[in-house]
Amino acid sequence: MDILENIPLAPFTTIGIGGPARWFVEATSEEEIVEATDWARVRGHPLFVLGGGSNLLVSDSGFDGLVLRVGLRGTEAVEADSGSGRPDELGKRVYKVYAGEDWDGFVERTAQDNCAGVECLAGIPGTVGGTPVQNVGAYGQEVASAIERVRAFDLEDQAFVEFAASECGFAYRHSRFNSEDHNRFIVTRVDFRLTADGEPTLRYADLLRAVHENQSGGGQPSLAEVAAIVRRVRESKGMLLVEGDPDCRSAGSFFKNPVVTKEQLKRIAASSEKGPPRFPAGVGAENVGRVKVPAAWLIEQSGFAKGYTLGAAGVSPRHTLALINKGGASATEVLALASSIADAVEDRFGIRLAMEPVLVGFQRQE
Ligand SMILES: Cc1cc2nc3c(=O)[nH]c(=O)nc-3n(C[C@H](O)[C@H](O)[C@H](O)COP(=O)(O)OP(=O)(O)OC[C@H]3O[C@@H](n4cnc5c(N)ncnc54)[C@H](O)[C@@H]3O)c2cc1C
């Protein structure tokens, strides 16, 4: 295993920003994960686990420690139906996918296999191992509902562990891996339980509209068609990685949609001519009596239109939630833009937007 020195991190991120990693290694097996983490631990170096770099903002000074890129590959599909006749096994297929696999490549494979459960998550960049970390979600699906098990290396106990989905603490853009156990586990494999010949999830308004426009003959679209439509909708918003498209040089959505109380909602409604759009906050006791409000709407109402620029950083001309690198932007510039947006929303509506990307190499780490 080669430990490299002073490797620029910008090319490993979708926003194309970030100084060098003091040390850098790619681990392609669980043994190499153990070896690389031992190397850093024995020397007392901080460790950062890198997937596809699609949800990161790396500081201009880089990361003064070991960046471990997760490069484990391989996918195994097994029929869950053991012949027991258990309803939870009927028609289910389990995919055991190693963490370094490309997420969208996996989604495409399941769509071609006609297995339902992740079709609306097509076009999300990054690795399979990155998906449980913030419980990726889009167009009416969250990865949590398809995950059966997560295998990970525990940096505290120096051992491999496996978690059932119910033990992962999944909620909106949230799991134990980005909260109480942040930096403790390296995900090495994710098992997904999908439904063979299942129907696509069609409940998100934008997606339903796009499907309707696409299906001139009517009828239910296939899973592969839904995945393709999702990618097209994403592309129209600059939310699909397309070579040469400057609007996708981002870290995806920069802010989470805030979940607000009824009192906060009243205050937002009172500060705007038209009340805000709102969505269900999701299941869970913490969400009772709350609704989710689109951060994009709050941002636009606070004076930041699509295409707004500050230095070499800007709001995407095609999606208010994505902050883009217009060419040569620094992390400092992106954070300055993010702060001015969050300040304006707070001044206007009394709500502090939370950032979605992970900050790497800053004094204040997310
Ligand atoms: C154009 C664009 C569109 C996007 N659209 C969406 C969307 O619709 N919905 C959505 O939820 N997200 C979206 N994202 C964000 C991002 O793609 C996802 O969060 C993705 O799952 C991140 O995976 P990654 O492998 O790139 O992780 P990275 O960005 O490399 O890392 C993100 C975090 O996960 C940790 N991590 C990564 N891999 C592992 C691992 N194997 N073990 C432990 N920790 C790990 C890192 O340490 C870091 O804390 C979008 C991003 C872009 C650029």
Image: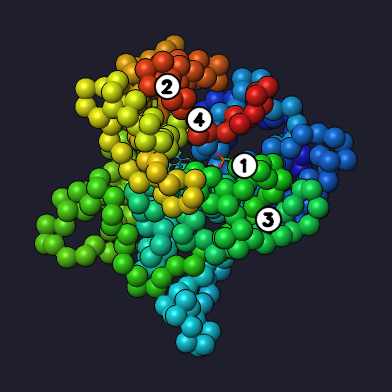
Residue 328 on image: x %, y %? 49, 18
- Helix, strand or loop at mark 4: loop
Residue at 50 percent across and 88 percent down: it is 83
Residue 98 on image: x %, y %? 60, 58
Graded by Cα atoms within 10 Å as few (under 14), some (14 to 19) or many (20 or more), the crowding at tag 4 reads some
N-terminal of the pair, mark 2 or mark 1, is 1
| Placement of 108 over or under 362, stated as above or below | below
Residue 319, by quadrant, is: top left
Left or right: 240 as drawn, with respect to 72:
left
| Placement of 252 over or under 147, stated as above or below | above
N-terminal of the pair, mark 4 or mark 3, is 3
- Residue depth check, mark 1 versus mark 3: number of the one nearer the observer: 1
Residue at 42 percent across and 12 percent down: it is 310
N-terminal of the pair, mark 4 or mark 1, is 1
- The residue to which callout 3 is attached is 152
Query: Alpha-carbon distance for marks 2 and 3?
Result: 39 Å
Residue 82 circle label:
none
N-terminal of the pair, mark 1 or mark 3, is 3
- Helix, strand or loop at mark 3: strand
Left or right: 96 as drawn, with respect to 230:
right
- The residue to which callout 1 is attached is 179
Query: Alpha-carbon distance for marks 4 and 1?
Result: 14 Å
- Residue depth check, mark 4 versus mark 2: number of the one nearer the observer: 2
| Three-letter code, disc 3 | Ala
- The residue to which callout 2 is attached is 350
Residue 267 on image: x %, y %? 34, 25
Residue 334 visible in the shown view: yes
- The residue to which callout 4 is attached is 355
Mark 3 within 8 Å of ligand 1, using the beta carbon = yes
Residue 344, by quadrant, is: top left
| Three-letter code, disc 1 | Ser
